[in-house]
Each structure stands twice: as C-alpha cells, then as structure tokens.
Amino acid sequence: MDFSVSFSSPLKSYTPFSLSCQLSFHPNAPQLLRFSRNPGIFLRKPPSISRQNNLAIKALQTSNQTKNDDFVLEDVPHLTNFLPDLPSYPNPLQKSQAYSIVKTNFVSPEDVVAQNIVIQKESPRGIHFRRAGPREKVYFKPEEVRACIVTCGGLCPGINTVIREIVCGLNNMYGVQDILGIEEGYKGFYSKNTMSLTPKVVNDIHKRGGTFLRTSRGGHDTHKIVDNIEDRGINQVYIIGGDGTQKGAALIYEEVKKRGLQVAVAGIPKTIDNDIAVIDKSFGFDTAVEEAQRAINAAHVEVESVENGVGIVKLMGRYSGFIAMYATLASRDVDCCLIPESPFYLEGQGGLFEFIEERLKENGHLVIVVAEGAGQEYVAAEVHAAGKKDASGNKLLLDVGPWLSDKIKDHFTKFQKMPINMKYIDPTYMIRAIPSNASDNIYCTLLAHGVVHGAMAGYTGFTVGSVNSKHAYIPIARVTERQKTVKLTDRMWARLLASTNQPSFVASDHERVDKEVSKV
C-alpha cells in the first residue's frame, strides 16, 4: 500500500524556493525521504535511511494534528550534492576532552530551527533551517584541510573575535594546522596578500578594533578568486562580510560547484546596521548600541548646560534604523528619533520644527538622534546630488546631520527669533572602530564555531546566524534577498514613540512630505 505526503511552502512568493517531500510505504521497500527542488538549490541527502524515516514520520504524525501543517525545510548545499562519492570520517570531537562532558555531542540530522516561533493553532508550521553544530561525521581529514579567512567591506566591532575563534576552533577542536589569512578583502586572493594564522598569532586580536586582516570594498573577480583557491589547494573558505560580500560568496560557491572542487564555502554575515534578513541580529550591533550611549549622553550634558540647547547625534543606519531606535530606547534622554523607514517633515502642524519649539518651551533643551539614511530625499532635493555609489555598490549617502543642524538653526533664528545653541555629534567612525563588548564576544564565538562545524561537516554555500536564539545554517540567498528594516507597525517602534512622545509624522500622509520636498 502506498501513501503520499507532500509538504510545500504556502509562501511561494516569499521563499526563494519551494520544497516537497514524498514518503512511500511498501511492505518490502525501504522508506525514502525525497526532496524536490528548483534548479540552483541543492539539498543534502541525509546519510541514514532510518533518520530519513524518522523525520518523515514525525512530519506525517504532526500533520495529522492540525488541518494545515505545512513544513518547509530551506536546506543548505552539501558537497555530496555534486561529489556523491565523497568519503566521510568520524568527527575528531569524539575524542575531545572538552566535549566528553557534553551529554549529546552531536547535532541530530533531524534538528531544525523554526523561522517563526509564534504561530496560531491552525496555521502552517512554516519555514525551518538546519540547526548549526558539530556532526557525527565530517568530510575533511584535519591534516588535509587548508583553510582561508577573508574580511570584506566596512568595519564593525567583533570582526577580530570571529577571525580568532575560527582559527582556534579549527585548530583546537579539529586539529587543523594550515590556515591562511587573505589580506585586504577579495582582491587579496589574486594579489597574493596572505599570512599564516595560528592560535598564537591571533591570541589577543579580539582586544583590538578593526580587522586584523585589513579590508577593502569591491575587487571581486570570481574566476580569479577560484583560480587562486584551486592553485593554493585551499579547501575551506570562510568569508566575513555584509550583503555584497555574501553575494560574492554565493558566486564563489557556484564556480566551485561548477568545477567540481571539494571546497566548502561558508559565510559569516557582518553589518553594524543589523539589516540582514532572517537572523536575529548581526554581531557588533550590541556594542554599537552601547557605545552610542556615550555620544547621546554627551549631547544631553551639553544641551542641558545652555539656553535652548539642541543636540543632534548622527548614528549608523543606511537603510535601517535599528541602531538609532535601540540607542534611543536605551538612553531615555532622547526627545526624537529619525530613521530611514519613517519619513518626517519639517514645517507645519505636526512637523519637526513645531515639536522642537514645544519641547524647548517645556524643557529648555532637547536631543535628536538621526540615522544616516534618514531624510535623504530632502537633502538630495536641496543639493541636487547625483546617485553615486561606492566600490561595493552601495549608494553614497548625503550627510543628513549638518543639513538638519543648519535647517533647525536657520528656522529658529530667522523665523522664530529664538536663539538656538546647536550641538552636533557624529560618533559613527568611533563606534565602528572599537573592540566588541562581552555580549558580542560570546556571540562572535558561537558564530565562528558554528561555521567551522558546518564546513567540516561538508556543508557549503551557507551562512550561519541566530534564528530565534538558536544557531542555524541558512542558504546565502536568503540573507541577501532583501534587507531587514524597522517595521513601523511593530511594538518596538510603538515603544519608542511612547518613550520620546515624538510625532509619528504620519498626519496628512504623503501630501505634507511632498510639499516639504518641493520647498527645499
């Protein structure tokens, strides 16, 4: 007797691919869990038929509990997808003194992490990712591993911690001795800039800001990079970088797969703005929010000490205002927070000028936090700037901080006849350059160890991140398909509005904004 069970994503417009599973029962036939997939998405065939059965049967049993219980596993590629005869070996952690005290040494092949943990009783189970962690089998002999690490893009607290823990994780947990550091970003692959990395070399780099390996933007040439990887005999590539860097990592993986190389390509997503999709947060974010408090506190002290003091603190946030929002909530000294997701206007009822005037009359001072990407439409309209881009392809932003300072000063001096003591602080590069704090150091360690376990287990073309506080392996395409932004309809933004008591800048909708843009 045959049964057929199908699991497919109800969110086809949202997910990069749909996934279906079929389970057949026959008296004398082995049970196989088969994944059907779109071209370009490679799913690892689990190593054990019994484990396949367990996952399928669990899914089948669960599906009987609710009317609509769709289960979607967005899996990551595995080397055996294009090298089916690749041998596996026992994980060296089995003999590790440190791991001997762990009750369950290895992550089960059935372990997955749910993208959404708050669901309704009758709703689909939704999207899941493979749980990160050490596997019982590895696909590299430690003595045959030649790994490399590269950092690309802008600076962020915690990069050095990630570098250190990848090196120490490979060496201490798996006995890997041959690790290279690629200097100055992607271009370092074909400009021959490398250094040998050992636990002793990287021992104290986590105490420094910046990146020990130096960095650059752009410089990505897929064929040259993979040629160099092949020529040097590199078989594990660890890439630390943001959106553009991870897209480059995906191209490297595709070229490696095309050439049939046993090379694991793994990414660690980096952005101080916390705008990477799917993951809970990016490393360095907690440090950035904490350090931003110093600038906000300094602005508050300054404006409290003078008549009609207005302090403006510009923080990072090209397209997403997470740092500005969390720093504002943490501070309690901020009167208004301006972010890219929430358009604001200056003049008229409910505008920023009116709010500033009321707050000055009430308290005699105020502090404004503005994300670097906020108000760009106003600044661009006034200075008639062209849409230039940097080497990474990011749009070059206009400096909203001085523009906003001048606008406020001119308005109150010329029209309100009210003297303003303006204090402007831009701590962005100071924040980017500091070492990570304790919280981020731990997070960086977990990310680094997770990516090492994944590469040794033969996964490739993946990135690692925290999803609902559990670390998971995520297809690179999922973290680069869109940018995470602050949702103005969520409770966190509502909490900020309640904390600052600032205008929501939504009255009269877009008409007032359009008028303001036409004036400048």
Image: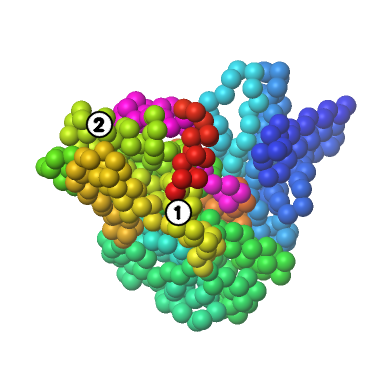
- Which residue in the structure is indicated by mark 1? 382
Q: Which mark is residue 306?
A: none
Q: Position of residue 184 (x, y in %)?
A: 44, 73
Quick one: quadrant of the N terminus? Answer: top right
Left or right of 155? Residue 260 is: right
Left or right of 400? Residue 61 is: right
Q: Which residues are magenta?
A: 479-506
Residue 489 seen in the current view: no
Residue that appears at 72% across and 66% down: 258
> What is the three-letter code of the residue carrying label 1?
Glu
Residue that appears at 86% across and 29% down: 2
> What is the three-letter code of the residue carrying label 2?
Arg
Residue 292 colored magenta?
no
Tag 2 secondary structure: helix
Furthest-bottom residue in this view: 192
Disc 1 crowd rating (10 Å Cα; few below 14, some 14-19, many 20+) is: some
Disc 2 crowd rating (10 Å Cα; few below 14, some 14-19, many 20+) is: some
- Above or below for 218 versus 488: below
Q: Position of residue 250 (x, y in %)?
A: 62, 59
Question: Quadrant of residue 90 in the image?
Answer: bottom right
- Above or below for 373 versus 55: below
- Which residue in the structure is indicated by mark 2? 359
Q: Looking at the image, is mark 1 or mark 2 nearer the viewer?
A: 1
Gap between marks 1 and 2 measured at Cα:
27 Å
